[in-house]
Amino acid sequence: MHYSFSKDFFWGAATSATQSEGRVEGDRKGENIWDYASKEYNHRFFDGVTTEQTSRFYEDYQEDIQKMADLSFNSFRTSISWSRLIPDGVGEVNPEAVVFYNQMLDELNAKGIQPFINLYHFDMPMKLQEIGGFENREVIQAYKKYAETCFELFGDKVAYWFTFNEPMIPAEAGYLHDRHYPYVVDFKRAAQVLHHIVLCHCEAIKSFREGGYSGKIGIIMDVIPVYPRSQHPADLYAAEMADLFYTKSLNDVILKGFYPEEIGEILRKYDQLPVVTTADKELLSATKIDLLGINYYRPRRVKARESVPNPEGVFSPEWFYDNYEMPGRRMNTSRGIEIYPKGLYDIAKKIQNEYGNIDWFVSENGIGIQDEEQYLQDDMVQDDYRIEFLEEHLSWLHQAMEEGSNCLGYHMWTFVDCWSWINAFKNRYGFYRMNLETGEKTVKKSGLWFKDVIENQGFDKNN
Ligand code: IFM
């Protein structure tokens, strides 16, 4: 079967500042929580690799952008590092950063690659974390100022802006699940962090609209579609709760302008409600995005809980469901997650049916593989598994688009193997392989396959 996509479909890849730029002497970048945590809590990072050793985009951006052009990308997402641009989070702007981001954006535009620029990708400036990060309401004004600085400095070079990448993660991983710094474990604090993040998003959109900048603005959400083990009411309830906590709450507030009532009731019952003022609610309901990015990696399969949660323990969404290991599920063993391409179709249908069929694009999708050097042959990673992964996800996406979904593009995670939060370089995701010893970046088989797809606006696949 032939899968064809429109001429103006966005094709490319995504990365983030902290995961790709690296640090060099004299760059005057301020420290962020990852620079700090990867040194101070070095044991938590795979092979102890810190943010200093990433894929060197700060130094190699010209060659890298040429490599994107070699694969015929027409778009590319990265983020602006808050602590590079404003080293203390507030106050003075770093002139070296302004030069770097201007040159990088010029280079992309000159090569016909549309920059998709995200503002916050997990990287709180350390100076602001010291006063509580997103837990502190004052940080909302600091973020707003940061966003305005970006619009002002780079607005003429960027047509697609995003306020946050995966806004749930800093709250969930940093304040509940002990994965990201500051390693707090407390649902109520996580909920407050999430609410402040949502307010930051709203304030940035407000500034963007009031500033009269051209272009579009949106947000990038990670969506994990939930599937119950069975149709038993207890399993259905478990699925409903997992979805409510991790997806619906955030999707509703961003796309509809209010938190679902059900979440309020549950949090009130367990004394976990964050502070939300009437003015906050007005701001939420007044905020509209132009474009939604969806990051999709895996499904969440759940079943009814098999034990009673410890009433003295830490309140969490997992009080309402257990994860379910479906027999025969197809796994990416490097990451320990299920591969389920149809999930992308299900997300597209949900956006179409429940969220007004808003314009959206796949802002991340990808497969991280450990020890990928085992597939090296004549200097090229023969990553047929990645090609298969792409074919399957793109064909489900295509089906959703045939049925009317307004999907405008597809970005793979990622362009060149990059540093990951916690896992550093354990799992490789790129279209280019990064040699950590020499810094050399060589195209993988999947990169060439993707180039063909872009140039032919589609691909053939045997069904
Ligand atoms: O590396 C991350 C990225 O920062 C956010 N989305 C998931 C990716 C792969 O784990």
Image (spheres, grey):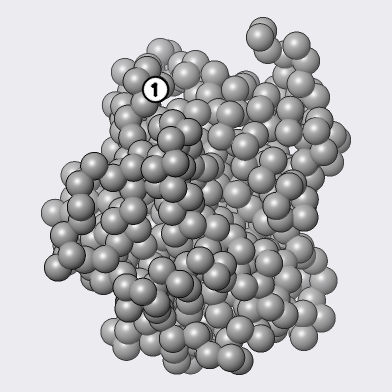
Drawn side of residue 136 relative to residue 307, left or right: right
Q: Residue 4: which quarter of the image?
A: top right
The image quadrant of residue 180 is bottom left
426 left or right of 198?
A: left
The residue indicated by pointer 1 is 329
User: Could you say where residue 313 lies in the image, as x and y percent from the top left?
Assistant: 17, 65
Residue furthest to the right: 7
Image location (x, y in percent) of residue 291: 73, 58
Residue furthest top as drawn? 462
Is residue 366 or residue 375 the one in the foreground?
366
Q: Residue at x 32, y 88 (%)?
A: 131
Does the rendering let one see residue 406?
yes
Q: Residue at x 73, y 71 (%)?
A: 288
Residue visible at 61% across and 22% down?
A: 391
- The kind of residue tagged 1 is Arg
- Name the spot of residue 454 as percent of width and height, x first: 73, 30
* Image x and y of residue 20, in percent: 44, 52
Residue 446 is at least partly visible in this image: no
Q: Is mark 1 within 8 Å of ligand 1?
A: no
Quadrant of the drawing holding the C terminus? top right
188 left or right, relative to 44: right
**Number of numbered discs present?**
1
* Relative depth, front residue between 106 and 156: 156
Q: Is residue 159 left or right of residue 276?
A: right
The residue drawn where x is 79% and y is 45% is 406
Circle 1 — which element? loop
Q: For the N terminus, which image quadrant?
A: top right
